[in-house]
Image (cartoon, rainbow, N blue to C red):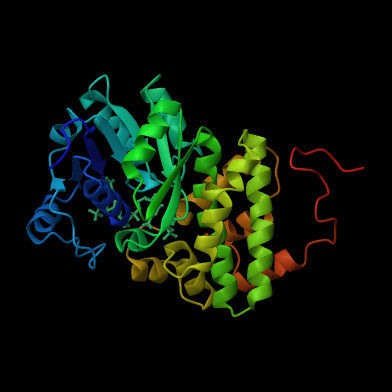
Amino acid sequence: MTSVSRPTVAVLGAGSWGTALAALLARNDVPTRLWGRDADALAAMAASRRNLRYLPDLDLPTELSYEADLATIVRGADIVLIVVPSHAFASMLDDIVPMLDPGTKISWATKGFETGTGRFLHELVNEKLPGRPAAVITGPSFAREVAAGLPSAVTVHATDDAFGKELAVLLHAPDFRAYTGNDILGAELGGAMKNVLAVATGVADGMELGLNARAGLITRGMNEMLRLGVALGARAETLMGLAGLGDLVLTCTGDLSRNRRLGLALGRGVSLDEAIREIGQVVESVVTADEVARLAGFHGLDLPIAAAVRSVLHGEVTPVQGLRALMGREQKPEYPVDLFGHRRS
Ligand SMILES: NC(=O)C1=CN([C@@H]2O[C@H](COP(=O)(O)OP(=O)(O)OC[C@H]3O[C@@H](n4cnc5c(N)ncnc54)[C@H](OP(=O)(O)O)[C@@H]3O)[C@@H](O)[C@H]2O)C=CC1
Ligand SMILES: O=C(CO)COP(=O)(O)O
């Protein structure tokens, strides 16, 4: 029997990750309702208890319910969990703000920035819903593996420690560890930037450049994440944890990653449009690469791997030219400045 005292969660976004998280919550006896913009697809999910397009192998728990009307699902929810792609986040937020009860808490598992501005998603939430408890769920977690019940660990960073803990407890399960933290900016930056860096390792692997190249790109990519993060006010430990390093390693090495697969395809000579069409799901790096470049520009930072990915995605250079440019950079100390930008003596 479902516990009546547990908060109700409205999950917005019925793709791979929204469906996997909704199923996880429902299996944890959290009263959970799932919304997707395609009412027919939602009705088919309810009837078949399967998300045939995004997670065909997952048996959806009978406890999970579905709601096609946004206002109905949002009104009365204790917690809203947004899991739409980053390009749709701002409009989703605009849609739900007038529908929210004053006590409803906001969370999201989207990885990326506001498209076109480089603003963090927590900045949008703070602006539209000032003072509202807010939390991001992030970390190394392929939806398909979570759906299959394979062990995973994520982290929940919140503006409000009590809400972060509440959400982590709702998610936590025998095969799903949910840690907590209060560095939303760092947690968001790690989750967004690893997608761009995964394209770089994918390109190198697609070109069959070897394991040394992959390890070099992951490590120097981590350095770029740390430098941008610290300049923006993130804590280094957040970036060295699940939200940063953990997700970077997963996405740069795991072929379930759509961002890595995009890189693999580009490295093998497939066009961007064809690769995206073949993947058939959201590939966040395509928009996030521009936002990382924007943020690096604001802070006067040179992030060569992220910049090379952006140039390849824009067709300004070929993957071969991009990698040649990275290898051809001047010789220099591994750490000419420390993480805080102080020149080493
Ligand atoms: N999949 C994963 O393993 C993980 C994903 N994430 C993050 O979660 C977010 C969502 O990704 P994921 O679920 O994988 O993506 P998918 O490609 O699997 O699904 C995207 C979902 O978003 C919906 N959607 C697209 N545009 C809009 C819109 N404008 N308004 C409402 N819904 C929309 C799609 O609907 P439709 O089918 O109608 O197009 C679909 O249901 C991304 O930021 C991703 O980085 C984070 C951790 C793990
Ligand atoms: O964020 C993810 C795993 O943590 C999913 O990565 P992709 O979007 O590259 O598939």
In the depicted view, which residue is nearer to us: 24 or 86? Answer: 24
List x then y, in percent, for residue 121.
44, 36
Residue at 60% over, 72% down: 204
Q: In the picture, which quadrant includes the N terminus?
A: top left
- Work out whether 73 lies above or below 51: above
Residue at 51% over, 77% down: 269
In the depicted view, which residue is nearer to us: 309 or 84? Answer: 84
Q: Is residue 226 visible?
A: yes
In the depicted view, which residue is nearer to us: 50 or 43? Answer: 50
Residue at 16% over, 36% down: 73
List x then y, in percent, for residue 247.
51, 55
Q: In the picture, which quadrant includes the C terminus?
A: top right
Tell whether 155 sits left or right of 305: left
List x then y, in percent, for residue 34.
20, 45
Looking at the image, the residue that sits furthest to the left is: 47
- Work out whether 190 lies above or below 342: below
Tell whether 139 sits left or right of 32: right
